[in-house]
Image (cartoon, grey):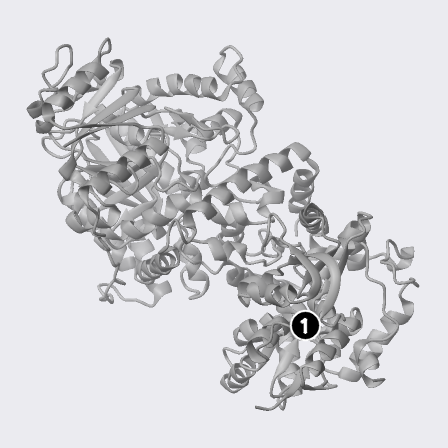
């Protein structure tokens, strides 16, 4: 069996025996910087804008709803099952599809609509990144298939960066089959190094920060 | 502190660019050093080592260790030859503990020329004068193995009448690489031409470097291209009055 | 070196357009990397490199332990690990699974490992449709070519080349604007994503404590490949293992910056098993193929083992003055550049392309930019020694070996060395101090001829240094 064969070769090459203990993993110092919320928000927005993503900051959940309503005017949209979006009243905006629990339906809708609307579990301010864990609340395809992605994020979910993320979430696999870090619109430079946005993932990303 | 230094001029300087060795001796003597030249010296063994002939390289390295055993400090007008001794002799003698001890002792007393001036002699102004516009080529061994970047520039900054202009792009290999220059001649030549484009871009009249091998490659390419730019070793610049 | 290697290098050097394309593209990536790893942009850069090196060393030095931990955790989350010793076992596994599930269409995201085992060719040979979805890889698949660069596979293609390929293979109207070419590809591939039965991806990292694979990309095709089809197969070399999820905090900070100068790539997917109960979408089946294909051969040598630390960022390619002249297709295997130069001989044996470790000026730029601090020049030197040992054993290159034996003898006998020097000076062409353009035909052989083919020769001085010294 190739498994035993390969493991045996590995052990022989390394001079190790089956089940032999290992020394401790070299420590990784996760440094979580002190950063005031206002600074995090400003940095998040600056990073996103540098990536040609759009940003908006709204004071309340109602304002978020209004913003999204304006953003989707004349367009078709699907909304994820995130409780936050329900609380904001975004899931019940006229004309949007939401509450989808069936994968075929979800795929068909996401492939068809103009905008996918989600929340996010976290955001990383130093890189302008959205952190999305797949769950009954957030399906993968909503932020992936439609050509535009709009994320509504309450400000208290904005972390400083990767170090903080892995400090508070050292074991993502325990929570989800899929954690995706999304940093700006889909892009490629495969033809003559010329930047083109929106290859397979959304070419338009909007992040609305609430609070 | 003794003021005795030994010269390891390198086989290339000995046979092809002797004035570089004389200039280096000149600068050191002016600074008050008593300079000697152990006659038994030949080569550091780098050509054999780089070509994969470690046994032959070991033979030459042993000769080097013996030749310079009695020297207190050894100064070398070449980054690549210095690095051969200080960084690669140890690779050759991992299986010979006694020789390895000699190597470690030797590593401490071999100095590339510019480093010797700034760190051992503690000088940056050697009283040189040369009216010229120059650019400096960082040889790869000096730059990346020995970490030399500012020492030659500080020394050049104190040469009266000298203007130093930096190349763009900087820190790119001239394409010599020892036997690479003849094993992959066309490629080496292409790299040299990219380097001389950068040189010409500075408008400098002279290219200065710590490494005679780089200077040979660069001057060879400049000459082939019919360009009037000349090359000088740092020692020659610092010996100018 | 082989005649073929020599010829490929020559052809690339002679192609002015290609020279410009390679130099410009790599130059841009190099400049961007420098910008985002500078002191003011990433003050911890050197510390991160040291940490990354230490983590990789630890993982590789204890590889069996982490492979087993990885396997346990993949299975704990409902996935399955399949160890494959070579290319045939990988394609056999995929073909067998496809047969059992009645799968016909496969979508693939970018994976050098699958290039290494010619997976597409094998699958297509057996009647499956396997479509590359990364734009650059898709272009190359249509053109039947191998990648030119680890990160920028179609670096050597102009928009007109791509237009030609699309018109011919996709039967669309000719289009040369990159944005529009991308739209064409997007439409074709979207259909494939949504119809595909199996999605095959690579994996940048295999995370032992999570049973997860990490996939890093910019286009979104890997996300689609691993989310839309019912079956996801991740194919990765066994060396991709890292101990913990939190170690990604180190590697992610280095990878995109080193590769393209981005702070982070657009998408980093951390995938652990098939979809969980309650999750709406995601694959129903999750497999990780762990490939040996010779990696175990790189483990025994404690120094050369570091070749397995590579995280495939391509920084060494972009900074290498040799790669920037000879490009990816001059190299004999799918992995090119400095990393290709050190792993190819170890996988294929040094006789596969004996010139490869010598196709370097040993400038050291690669080692300086490697995010995991692989000492590439050191391994190149070791491989050179291996080549010569092998040649000695085979009785090859006897003249060169003899020449270096003579070299060692001369250099350990100073009087002979001096005499040899005087002899050479005496037969050197006369020159009035000018550098020498040519020498008489009988002398223009071997290294002399090679040198003179590209540059002038220094004139022979009238006295050697030691003669001048003695005369003082």
**Residue C464 image position (x, y, % from top left):** 82, 75
Residue B184, compared with residue B238, is above or below; it is above
In the shown orientation, is residue A133 left or right of residue C142?
left
Element marked by disc 1: loop
Quarter-wise, where is residue B102 in the image?
bottom right
Quarter-wise, where is residue C60 in the image?
bottom left
**Residue C254 image position (x, y, % from top left):** 37, 49
**Residue C103 image position (x, y, % from top left):** 29, 25
Q: In this view, which residue lies farthest toward the front?
A: B161
Q: Residue at 48% of width from left, 26% of height from top?
A: C139
For residue B42, say whether it is visible.
Answer: no
Quarter-wise, where is residue B75 in the image?
bottom right
Residue A176, compared with residue C351, is above or below; it is above
Q: Residue at 56% of width from left, 49% of height from top?
A: C320
Q: Nearer the viewer, residue A39 or C213?
A: A39
Q: Nearer the viewer, residue C245 or C128?
A: C245
- Tell me the chain of label 1: B
User: How many numbered discs sit on the rendered protein?
Assistant: 1
Q: In this view, which residue lies farthest toward the top?
A: A74
In the shown orientation, is residue B110 left or right of residue C291?
right
Which residue position is annotated with label 1? B77
In the shown orientation, is residue C221 left or right of residue C450?
left
Circle 1 Cα neighbour tier, 10 Å, few/some/many (<14 / 14–19 / ≥20): many
Residue C173, compared with residue C153, is above or below; it is above
Name the quadrant of the C terminus of chain C: bottom right
Q: Residue at 14% of width from left, 39% of height from top?
A: A156
In the shown orientation, is residue A66 left or right of residue C392?
left
């Amino acid at each position: 069996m190739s498994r035993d064969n390969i493991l045996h070769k590995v052990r022989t090459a390394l001079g190790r025996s089956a089940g032999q203990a290992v020394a401790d993993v070299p420590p990784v110092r996760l440094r979580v910087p002190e950063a005031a919320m206002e600074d995090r928000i400003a940095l998040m927005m600056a990073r996103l804008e540098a990536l040609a993503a759009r940003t908006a900051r709204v004071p309340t959940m109602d304002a978020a709803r209004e913003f999204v309503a304006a953003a989707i005017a004349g367009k078709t949209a699907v909304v994820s099952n995130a409780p936050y979006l329900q609380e904001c009243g975004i899931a019940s905006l006229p004309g949007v599809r939401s509450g989808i629990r069936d994968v075929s339906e979800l795929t068909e809708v996401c492939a068809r609509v103009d905008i996918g609307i989600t929340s996010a579990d976290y955001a990383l301010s130093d890189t302008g990144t959205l952190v999305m864990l797949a769950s009954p609340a957030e399906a993968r395809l909503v932020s992936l298939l439609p050509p535009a992605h709009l994320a509504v994020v309450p400000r208290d979910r904005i972390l400083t960066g990767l170090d903080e993320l892995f400090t508070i979430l050292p074991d993502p696999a325990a929570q989800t089959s899929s954690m995706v870090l999304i940093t700006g619109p889909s892009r490629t430079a495969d033809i003559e190094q010329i930047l083109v946005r929106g290859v397979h993932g959304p070419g338009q990303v909007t992040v609305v920060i609430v609070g | 502190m003794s003021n005795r230094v030994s010269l390891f001029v390198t086989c290339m300087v000995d046979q092809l660019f002797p004035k570089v060795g004389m200039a280096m001796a000149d600068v050191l003597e002016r600074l008050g050093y008593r300079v000697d030249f152990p006659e038994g010296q030949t080569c550091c063994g780098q050509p054999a080592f780089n070509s994969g002939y470690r046994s032959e390289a070991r033979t030459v390295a042993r000769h080097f260790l013996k030749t310079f055993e009695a020297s207190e400090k050894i100064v070398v007008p070449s980054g690549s030859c210095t690095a051969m001794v200080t960084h690669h002799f140890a690779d050759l003698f991992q299986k010979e503990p006694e020789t390895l001890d000699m190597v470690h002792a030797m590593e401490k007393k071999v100095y590339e020329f510019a480093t010797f001036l700034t760190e051992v002699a503690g000088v940056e102004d050697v009283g040189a004068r040369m009216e010229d516009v120059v650019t400096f080529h960082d040889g790869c061994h000096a730059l990346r193995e020995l970490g030399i970047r500012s020492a030659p520039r500080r020394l050049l900054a104190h040469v009266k009448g000298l203007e130093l202009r930096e190349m763009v792009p900087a820190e790119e290999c001239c394409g010599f690489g020892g036997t690479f220059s003849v094993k992959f001649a066309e490629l080496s030549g292409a790299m040299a031409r990219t380097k001389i484009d950068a040189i010409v871009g500075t408008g400098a009249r002279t290219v200065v470097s710590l490494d005679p091998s780089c200077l040979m490659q660069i001057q060879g390419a400049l000459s082939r291209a019919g360009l009037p730019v000349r090359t000088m070793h740092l020692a020659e610049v610092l010996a100018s009055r | 070196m082989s005649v073929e290697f020599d010829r490929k290098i020559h052809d690339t050097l002679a192609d002015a357009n290609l020279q410009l394309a390679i130099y410009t593209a790599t130059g841009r990536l190099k400049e961007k990397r420098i910008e985002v790893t500078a002191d003011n942009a990433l003050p911890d850069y050197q510390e991160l490199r040291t940490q990354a090196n230490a983590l990789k060393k630890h993982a590789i030095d204890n590889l069996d332990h982490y492979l087993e931990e990885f396997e346990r955790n993949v299975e704990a989350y409902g996935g399955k690990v399949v160890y494959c010793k070579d290319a045939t076992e990988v394609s056999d596994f995929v073909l067998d699974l496809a047969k059992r599930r009645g799968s016909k269409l496969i979508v693939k995201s970018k994976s050098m490992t699958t290039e290494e085992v010619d997976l597409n060719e094998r699958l297509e040979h057996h009647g499956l449709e396997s479509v590359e979805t990364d734009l650059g890889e898709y272009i190359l698949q249509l053109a039947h070519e191998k990648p030119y660069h680890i990160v920028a596979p179609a670096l050597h293609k102009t928009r007109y080349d791509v237009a030609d390929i699309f018109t011919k293979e996709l039967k669309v109207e000719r289009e040369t604007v990159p944005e529009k070419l991308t739209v064409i590809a997007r439409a074709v591939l979207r259909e494939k994503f949504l119809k595909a039965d199996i999605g095959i991806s690579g994996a940048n990292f295999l995370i032992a404590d999570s049973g997860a694979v990490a996939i890093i990309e910019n286009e979104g095709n890997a996300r689609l490949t691993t989310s839309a089809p019912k079956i996801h197969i991740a194919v990765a070399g066994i060396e991709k293992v890292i101990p913990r999820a939190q170690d990604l905090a180190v590697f992610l900070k280095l990878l995109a910056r080193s590769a393209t100068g981005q702070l982070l790539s657009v998408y980093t997917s951390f995938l652990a098993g098939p979809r969980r109960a309650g999750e709406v979408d995601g694959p129903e089946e999750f497999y990780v193929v762990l490939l040996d294909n010779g990696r175990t051969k790189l483990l025994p040598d404690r120094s050369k083992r570091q070749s397995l630390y590579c995280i495939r960022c391509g920084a060494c390619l972009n900074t290498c003055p040799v790669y920037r002249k000879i490009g990816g297709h001059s190299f004999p295997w799918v992995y090119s550049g400095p990393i290709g130069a050190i792993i190819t001989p170890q996988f294929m044996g040094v006789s596969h392309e004996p010139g490869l470790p010598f196709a370097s000026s040993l400038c050291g730029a690669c080692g300086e930019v490697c995010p995991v601090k692989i000492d590439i020049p050191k391994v190149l030197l070791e491989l050179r020694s291996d080549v010569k040992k092998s040649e000695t054993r085979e009785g090859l290159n006897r003249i060169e070996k003899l020449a270096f034996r003579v070299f060692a003898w001369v250099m350990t006998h100073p009087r002979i060395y001096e005499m040899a020097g005087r002899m050479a000076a005496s037969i050197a062409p006369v020159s009035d101090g000018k550098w020498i353009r040519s020498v008489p035909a009988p002398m223009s052989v071997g290294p002399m001829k090679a040198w003179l083919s590209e540059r002038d020769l220094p004139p022979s001085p009238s006295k050697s240094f030691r003669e001048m010294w003695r005369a003082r």
